[in-house]
Amino acid sequence: MGNPSKNDIQKFYADPESWKYGCIYYCPGDPRIIVPKRLRWTGWTINFAHPRAWVTLTGLILFAVLPPLFVLCYSRDQNLFILTLILVILGLCFWSHHQATKYN
């Protein structure tokens, strides 16, 4: 299947068969790696049918953990640690939003 249209993506997303156990998104036809959760205001989830899903999940975890851990180990400055956490969270939110909406 080529590039699906916006309508195709919306159909994939709305199809209950794309949601395993009601919360795990698994849709091979959807080209997005990151998608909004079913309750859109609660954040994003990963399309586990995408070939790069597990690589993306690993990268997200590393991006969320390594910078604050580095600051904690080498600086011990509480303000820098909090600032790093805030920047990591904001970065993850902006990146996830961009990935989830780039086909809209």
Image (spheres, helix red, strand yellow):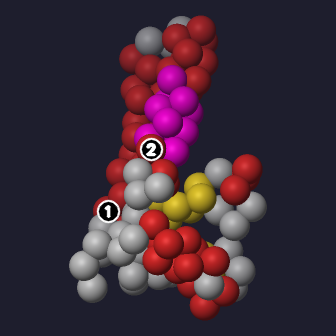
Q: Is residue 10 above or below residue 91?
A: below
Q: Are marks 2 and 1 in contact (CB under 8 Å)?
A: no
Q: Residue at x 71, y 80 (%)?
A: 22
The N terminus is located in which quarter?
bottom left
**Dividing the picture into quarters, in which one does residue 28 lie?**
bottom left
Distance of label 2 from label 1 (alpha carbons): 18 Å
User: As displayed, is residue 93 above or below residue 11?
Assistant: above
Query: What is the x, y in percent for residue 47?
Result: 47, 71
**Can see residue 88?**
yes
Residue at mark 2: 98
Residue beneath the point at 52% across and 11% down: 80
Is 55 left or right of 79, judged from the image as shown?
Answer: left
Question: Which SS class for mark 2?
Answer: helix
Pick whichever of labels 2 and 1 is earlier in the sequence. 1
Q: Which mark is residue 31?
A: none
Q: Nearer the viewer, residue 49 or 72?
A: 49
Residue extending farthest to the left is 2
Q: Amino acid at mark 2?
A: His
* Corner quadrant of residue 57: bottom left
Q: Percent x, y for residue 29?
A: 39, 82
Q: Nearer the viewer, mark 2 or mark 1?
A: 2
Q: Is residue 63 left or right of residue 81?
A: left
Which structural element holds mark 1? helix
The residue sitting at 57% across, 84% down in the picture is 18
Question: How many marks on residues?
Answer: 2
